[in-house]
Image (cartoon, rainbow, N blue to C red):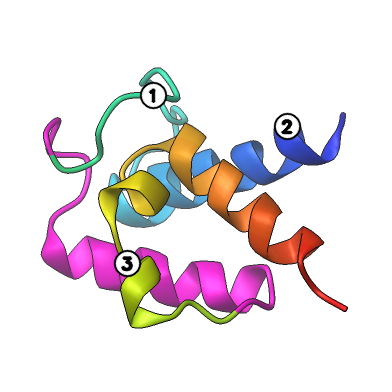
Amino acid sequence: MDTNDTVAAKIRDYIARNLLFSEQGFEYEDDVSFLESGIIDSYGFIELLHWVEEEFSISVADEELVPDNFDSVRNLTSFVLGKVSGRD
């Protein structure tokens, strides 16, 4: 499994277990909008943000809190990989 798949799998698993309370797994396509589809609400977004920072040891700046970074598994995976690869 490559890094992209590993990050995406962790995100899917976290959302399924902690925000959807599902043992069935994440049953959406990776490009489905979290907010438009009702997968997460504003409280869930804050939970997801904190988990991402802790899980991947990254810091998210206020200006990075945009849908292009956080509104789907695909967007969030790309954002996390970009932050992790930008470390010194």
**Which quadrant, please, contains the N terminus?**
top right
- Boundaries of the magenta span: 36-58
Above or below, 58 relative to 52:
below
**Residue at the (79%, 60%) spot, across then down:** 85
Q: Is residue 37 magenta?
A: yes
Instruction: Measure the alpha-carbon separation of dots 1 and 2.
Output: 14 Å
Q: Earlier in the sequence, mark 1 or mark 3?
A: 1
**Residue at the (48%, 77%) spot, across then down:** 60
Q: Secondary structure at mark 1?
A: loop
Above or below, 42 relative to 30:
below
Give the residue at mark 2: 5
Q: Amino acid at mark 3?
A: Leu
Q: Is residue 40 magenta?
A: yes
Q: Are marks 2 and 3 in contact (CB under 8 Å)?
A: no
Judge the density around disc 1: few (<14), some (14-19), many (≥20) Cα neighbours within 10 Å: few
**Residue at the (28%, 45%) spot, across then down:** 20
Q: How many marks?
A: 3
Q: Position of residue 40 (x, y in %)?
A: 21, 49
Give the residue at mark 3: 65
Instruction: Measure the alpha-carbon separation of dots 2 and 3.
Output: 23 Å
